[in-house]
Image (cartoon, helix red, strand yellow):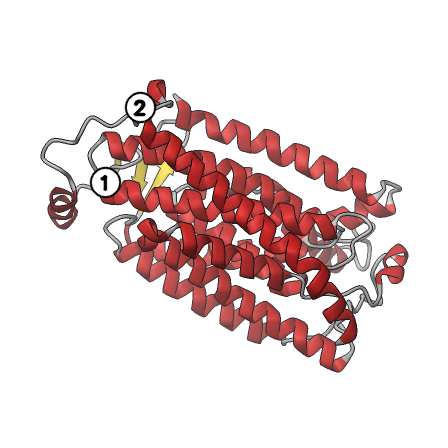
């Protein structure tokens, strides 16, 4: 069940062995892919693509802002605050929402322009991101039309999320480039969980998408955390690309390189969106952006086979989701007595007197430290 893991290795089945033979060159050319020779042309070209992708995504959002935000004002696509939300958030009523459309557009354009060589991974990641973005768009649009914070019904959103997640799980399970193995960070090995991979992936995607959505409660919070997470995932995909090419698995290497491009697009678009989303926010991403980013985060974990690292690297997402679950549970068990002043937990910190920028900064610091720790096993 446990096997040695080398980033490019796949479960040892006859079908995958045949596939690997077809995609591996008999004698891999001498390319400077090694970690000790990062100044080679191969590495420089890859890093150049990554930087250009991030800058392109950033520029798209940065240029769209002055055009898109006034248009949202004219269309009266304003934020509808919860009646039970923090009192300080009442002043945010009417701030343009659905700004996630800018982020989604930037990620799509930048990934398609620069990630064509890795479409086996990039295209599914994009499709999932856009699919969840569409679900979020419908939710936002219904809220605006009804002029309240009740969009799609809970069961409607859940069914759509499960459907998308199920398609991804089956595709990943059947893919010879992914399979049913999970990376074990401590031992450096891998764990083939077989058919149980499908329900695990469905659960991870649905949970992560909703966790990112819950994290989007303060100006710049979800965007900042996702930017840091994506930046470290870019580093992980970079190491995996180098080692896959060293092993002669060039098709896998190309697709992992494509995911570097995808991560760069998410990082660049997030930085661009922060230009308008930091406190005090001029625009909110809405469910359009938060659900799309949740889909992107999930796909990074699945395509890198680092699902077991996701709760650590995405701890701030997990904290948001768990705090809501604990709040509801304690409210029922303790007859109205709650664990937090308000859930998700960032609202608890807010009501405890911490200003929004300070909370966002602490979330970024925690995410950076945890992601750095999770990167270490890939560098040994």
**Quarter-wise, where is residue 316 in the image?**
top right
Place of residue 248 in the rendered image (x, y in percent of width and height, measured from the top left)? 20, 34
Does the rendering let one see residue 311?
no
Secondary structure beneath label 1? helix
Question: To which quarter of the image does residue 20 belong?
Answer: top left
Tell me residue 58's x, y (percent).
Answer: 59, 48
Query: Secondary structure under badge 2?
Result: loop
Q: How crowded is mark 2: few (under 14 residues within 10 Å), some or many (20 or more)?
A: some
In the image, 286 versus 194, the foreground residue is: 286
Please identify the quadrant where the N terminus is shown: top left
Specify the label residue 327 is tagged with: none
Residue depicted at 26% across the width and 54% down the height: 175
Q: Tell me, yes or no, whether the two marked residues, 2 and 1, touch with CB atoms within 8 Å.
A: no
Q: Position of residue 262 (x, y in %)?
A: 45, 49
The circle on residue 34 is 2
Instruction: Please tell me the numbered disc located at residue 250.
Output: 1
Dot placed on the residue nearer the N-terminal end, 2 or 1: 2
Question: Which residue is found at the position 78% from the left and 57% from the top?
Answer: 282
Whether residue 272 is visible here, answered yes or no, is yes
Q: Nearer the viewer, residue 13 or 24?
A: 24
The span from disc 2 to disc 1 (Cα, nearest Å) is 14 Å
Q: Residues within 10 Å of mark 1 (few under 14, many from 20)?
A: many
**From what the image shows, is residue 260 above or below residue 37?**
below
116 or 341, nearer to the observer: 116
Quadrant holding the C terminus: top left
């Amino acid at each position: 069940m446990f096997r040695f893991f080398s980033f490019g290795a796949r479960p040892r089945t006859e079908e995958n062995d045949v596939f690997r033979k077809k995609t591996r060159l008999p004698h891999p050319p001498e390319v400077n892919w090694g970690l000790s020779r990062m100044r080679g042309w191969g590495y420089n070209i890859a890093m150049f693509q990554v930087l250009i992708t991030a800058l392109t995504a950033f520029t798209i959002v940065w240029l769209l802002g002055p055009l898109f935000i006034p248009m949202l004002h004219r269309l009266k696509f304003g934020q509808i605050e919860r009646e039970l939300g923090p009192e300080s958030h009442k002043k945010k009523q009417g701030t343009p929402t659905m700004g996630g459309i800018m982020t989604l557009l930037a990620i799509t354009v930048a990934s398609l322009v620069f990630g064509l060589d890795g479409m086996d991974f990039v295209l599914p990641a994009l499709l999932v991101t856009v699919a969840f973005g569409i679900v979020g768009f419908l939710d936002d649009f219904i809220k605006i039309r009804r002029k309240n914070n009740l969009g799609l019904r809970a069961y409607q959103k859940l069914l759509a999320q499960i459907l998308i997640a199920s398609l991804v799980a089956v595709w990943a399970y059947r893919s010879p480039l992914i399979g049913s193995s999970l990376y074990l960070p401590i031992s450096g090995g891998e764990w083939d969980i077989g058919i149980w991979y499908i329900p695990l992936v469905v659960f991870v995607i649905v949970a992560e998408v909703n966790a990112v959505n819950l994290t989007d409660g303060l100006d710049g919070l979800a965007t900042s955390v996702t930017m840091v997470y994506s930046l470290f995932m870019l580093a992980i995909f970079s190491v995996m690309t180098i080692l896959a090419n060293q092993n002669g698995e060039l098709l896998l290497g190309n697709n992992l390189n494509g995911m570097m491009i995808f991560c760069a697009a998410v990082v660049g678009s997030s930085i661009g969106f922060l230009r308008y989303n930091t406190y005090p926010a001029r625009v909110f991403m809405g469910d359009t952006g938060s659900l799309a980013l949740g889909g992107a985060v999930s796909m990074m974990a699945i395509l890198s086979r680092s699902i077991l690292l996701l709760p650590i690297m995405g701890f701030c997402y997990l904290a948001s989701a768990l705090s809501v679950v604990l709040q509801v549970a304690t409210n029922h068990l303790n007859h109205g007595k709650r664990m937090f002043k308000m859930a998700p937990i960032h609202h608890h910190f807010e009501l405890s007197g911490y200003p929004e920028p300070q909370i966002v900064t602490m979330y970024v610091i925690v995410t950076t430290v945890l992601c750095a720790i999770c990167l270490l096993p890939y560098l040994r």
